[in-house]
Image (tube, rainbow, N blue to C red):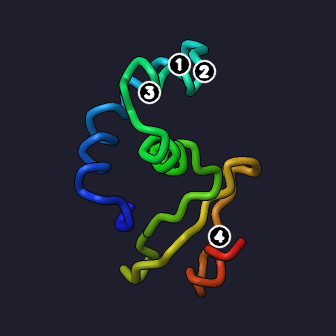
Amino acid sequence: MKNLSPALLRKLDTHYDKIASLFTDGENLEDIQGNLQISDSDMQKIEEVMFNMFPFYTAKDVDGNERVMKFNAYTLQSKEVTDVKEELQY
């Protein structure tokens, strides 16, 4: 999320709950985009954030050290990432 512009972060903050609710109710993303008047490029970036099946996050281990983790939504498992740049290439 650090790579998103401040304007796009505001749009995501403003529309996240509405997009999630409409999507859960069965609306397709094109209709949601039209109803909320979001540009194609902004909607693409919002989709990448909201529907990312392999998000990265940070967690602290038992010793208090911060670790970068990658979640797999298909297996519901996380693994520690030692080289984030390498992981992003996949």
Decide: is 55 above or below 58: above
Q: Nearer the viewer, residue 69 or 35?
A: 35
Which residue in the structure is indicated by mark 4?
79
Circle 1: is it few (<14), some (14-19), or many (20+) Cα within 10 Å? few
Which residue type does callout 3 highlight? Ile
How far is disc 2 from disc 4 in space, using C-alphas? 32 Å
**Residue furthest right in the image:** 75
Which residue in the structure is indicated by mark 3?
19
Query: Horizontal and vertical percent for residue 89?
Result: 67, 76
Say which quadrant the C terminus sits in.
bottom right
Mark 1: secondary structure: helix
Circle 4: is it few (<14), some (14-19), or many (20+) Cα within 10 Å? few
At a point 60% along the width and 78% down the height, the residue shown is 81
Which residue in the structure is indicated by mark 1?
31
Which residue type does callout 1 highlight? Asp
Mark 4: secondary structure: strand
Which residue type does callout 4 highlight? Lys
Q: Is residue 66 left or right of residue 55?
A: left
Mark 2: secondary structure: loop
| Viewer-nearest of discs 2 and 4 | 2
